[in-house]
Structure formats: C-alpha cells, structure tokens
Image (cartoon, rainbow, N blue to C red):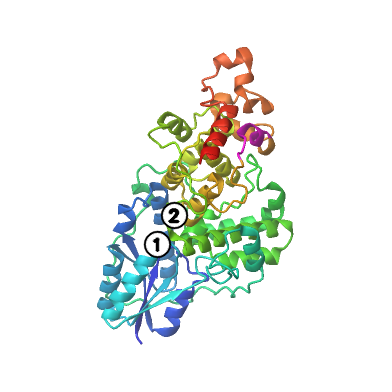
Amino acid sequence: MNVSVVLFTCDLRLHDHPPLRAALDGARQVVPLFVRDRAVTAAGFDAPNRRAFLADCLRDLDAGLRERGGRLVVRSGDVVAEVCRVAAETDADEVHLAADVSAFAHRRERRLRRALEAEGRRLHVHDTVTWAVTPGTVTPSSSDHFAVFTPYFRHWSRQRLRDPLAPPRAVRVPDAVGSGRLPTREEVPERSPGLAAGGEREGRRRLAAWLRSGLAGYADGQDDLAGDATSRLSPHLHFGTLSPVELVHRARRAGGPGAEAFVRQLAWRDFHRQVLAARPEAASADYRTKHDRWRSEDTAHADVEAWRAGRTGYPVIDAAMRQLRHEGWMHNRARLLTASFLAKTLYVDWRVGARHFLDLLVDGDLANNQMNWQWVAGTGTDSRPNRVLNPVVQGRRYDPDGTYVRRWVPELRGVPGPAVHEPWKLGRERAVLDYPEPVVGLADGLARFREARARA
C-alpha cells in the first residue's frame, strides 16, 4: 500500500488523531485532506464566526503538517466527489475518516463508502476522535440509548478510555496532489468583533493555562457569570483542535472537585451525541414531549427581535445576548437563562432560539445546541420539563453585584450593586436610562406558560 487519504472534518489537530495514525501506519504517503463542503453552506451551517475560526484552524493545521514535512490539501465542492478525485489522482487505496453522529454526517459517510467501493477503494471510519465514549457503547437494558443523564454518566464513568496518541513525527504527502488556497479569517464578513482565535496551538495553550490555573476552582466558580471561570474550550472541542479523550485523561490526572465537575461537562457532550445518534430527527423535532402551541417567530416577532438584540428589559438576559453577538460565545449559565426566557417566559418555539444560536456561536455544535435547547424548553431529556428560570432571581444569584450586567449593558453602568437587576424599580433615576421596559411581566409570562402547558 502506497497512499492513504485522511479526510479531516471536526478533528483539526495532529495530537491524538486515530485516523491519521492509522493512515501513517498503513501507507508510505498520506494526503491530509480538508474539503470546504458546499452542502454545509447550502444548509446554512456555514456561519461567519465558525467560518472565521475554521480558517484559523486550517492554517494552524497546515503549519503543523509543514513542520513535519507535509502540508494540508484543501479542496472545495462536494465532499464525496473531491475525496474520490484526490484518491484517483494519488492512486490511494484507503480513506480514513472520524465518525460523527448527525444525519448529515451519516449520509455523507454512506455516499462516500459507496463511491469509494465502486472504485475498488476502502473507507475506514474511526471512533473516539470527536467524543470520549462512542455513542451506543453504553445503553440501558430497555432501550438503544440513555434518555436521562445521571444513569448515563454512571455507566460512562466506568468506561476505560483509550490512551491518547502522540502527534506524528513526519508526514509525507505526494508532490503531485494539488491544493486550493487556505482561507483567512480577515476575509469573512460579519464575524463577531471579539471572536477568539482558533487552531490547535491556541487550543493547547488555553488547555495548559486552564489546567494550571482554572480547573481547581471550576466546581465552585463554573456558574459565576462575572468571574468567567469556565474553560472556554468548547470551540476547540467543536472543531476538534483538542481531543476529548485527552481532556478527560488530563483532568482526571489533576484530580479534585474541579476536575470532577469538568469531566461531568465533557460527559454531557457525549450524552447529547448518543441521544442524537439514536434519534437524529431530534435535531429539529421534539424529542420527548411534543408541544404544538408555541408562539411562532411571526406571531412573536417584536419579542424575538428584542431577545436577539439584547433589549428585553431584563438585564442579565440582555447582557448574555450582547456577549453572544460580540464574542460568538456565551457563558453556559447564560445560555440556560436566555433559552428559558425565550422558550418559557416568552413561550416562543425553541427552534427559533436554536437557529439564532447556531447563527452566532463559534462552538455551534448540532448535538449540544439542539439537545440543550430541548432540555430547557421541556421537550428533551430534562426530568423537570416545567421548570422556569426567573432572570431576576438567577441574576442576583450568579451575578450578585451586577458586574456581568454592567460589563455588557453600558446603559446600566451607573446603577450600583444588585439594583441593576431590576432597573424598573429605580424611581426617578429610571427616566434618564436609555434602557427598555420589560417586554413582558414575569408573572404574566409564567401564567401564559402554565396555561399553554395545561392545554397541551
């Protein structure tokens, strides 16, 4: 065997990369290939923030390969056609690919396998590249997947993870195979001004800093909105510049309550993947409890626009939505609050919010995004589907002195302390603030939610 192709997708790294290792072990030359898939653009998943972050990742991956004597081959078009074209150009016998769980990924894999087999070539699909525990590895006795996180986590925690792989020392790429131009983030319009940098080097730098000075305090600080004590590694997990297997190993080696809490969050990623792998329709359809009385985007247009713009009149909600627009990222607690506000206080279809998040989030992962939105909306895996998060109570609890709110809502920077969470109570001071009245009273929103659920 002389040549193998490695198709990179959401695994844009050299450390702990089973498909690349398998290709290097089985062939004298390897083509590291990334295809800028026109189907992703057509489906609306090619959002500016992810496109800009991807450009960073591809340039960094190419640089890492060049340090090892290789390079990244970039093509554009239909993935199956481009992979087959590269395989034919190099007379490659095998193509290696990381497994994924979405219906889109499964269709791509089936098409690619058929096309390659028709040409006498083989496709190898590798697990534990974009997750720690493969979907379907742990299942209850009565179903093909776990629908509740806690029992899943117990089984997940008992799994023995494979050892992370070292990066390759050398990668030999056929000279003749041509490549398109690498994209740059600067050429992506409408990206968020505060968007973080991408790439494996940046991901590993962030990971090292997090293990050194952030992980130990994570259990106590993960919900502190102003403290911003989360790892911010989710974009790197989404694009695969960091390995979830390696993260679990390194966190467990560090030990302590912070490591336990962090590993639990990594298990949530795998939990959502095993749900979506078993029920791919849950990306757009209610997973558990169907509700058909949602207010549509058209019906609730003014409320939805106020939510998107961070002008709902509820400071912690508005701060979070403005952070999302500025950074392409949002604190996990803030994601829960803003989703609950849209789906339950405003009673707008969760798919409206999920789409907006996917339009802006650099870590806009289909499994995590859709299943988290369903969890909050009460249609997914939450065992308490009728819970409603009060933005005032939550703001006082997780941003007690209002620092997070004042950081993102400049209209309220002159309001001291926790009073910032209820600006409608400021009396005469209220008149000079360029800040909207609440779009709905919390009692009214709760009553509408309960009435709609009672009639459902």
Amino acid tagged 2: Ala
Name the chief secondary structure element in magenta: helix
- Numbered circle sitting on residue 275: none
Question: Which of the two residues, 357 or 164, is positioned nearer the viewer here?
Answer: 357
Position of 98 relative to 233 (above/below):
below
In this picture, residue 10 sits left or right of residue 268: left
Q: Quadrant of residue 344?
A: top right
Q: Is residue 222 visible?
A: yes
Residue 195 screen position, x and y as percent: 47, 46
**Which quadrant would residue 166 be assigned to in this image?**
bottom right
Q: Residue furthest right?
A: 256
Start-end of magenta stretch: 388-396
- Residue type, label 1: Ala
Q: Which mark is residue 283?
A: 2
In the rendered image, the residue lying farthest to the bottom is 1
Q: Is residue 390 above or below residue 228?
A: above
Q: Position of residue 187 (x, y in %)?
A: 33, 48
Residue 28 occupies which quadrant of the picture? Answer: bottom left
Element type at mark 2: helix
Q: How many marks?
A: 2
Q: Could you classify mark 2 by the number of other residues whose Cα lies within 10 Å: few (under 14), some (14-19), or many (20 or more)?
A: many
Residue, far top: 428
Q: Secondary structure at mark 1?
A: helix
Q: CA distance from mark 2 to mark 1?
A: 9 Å
x and y, in percent, of residue 395 in the image: 64, 34
| Residue 103, label in figure | 1
Task: Please state if 318 lies on the left or on the right of 84 as rendered.
Answer: right
Asked if residue 323 shows in the view, the reply is no
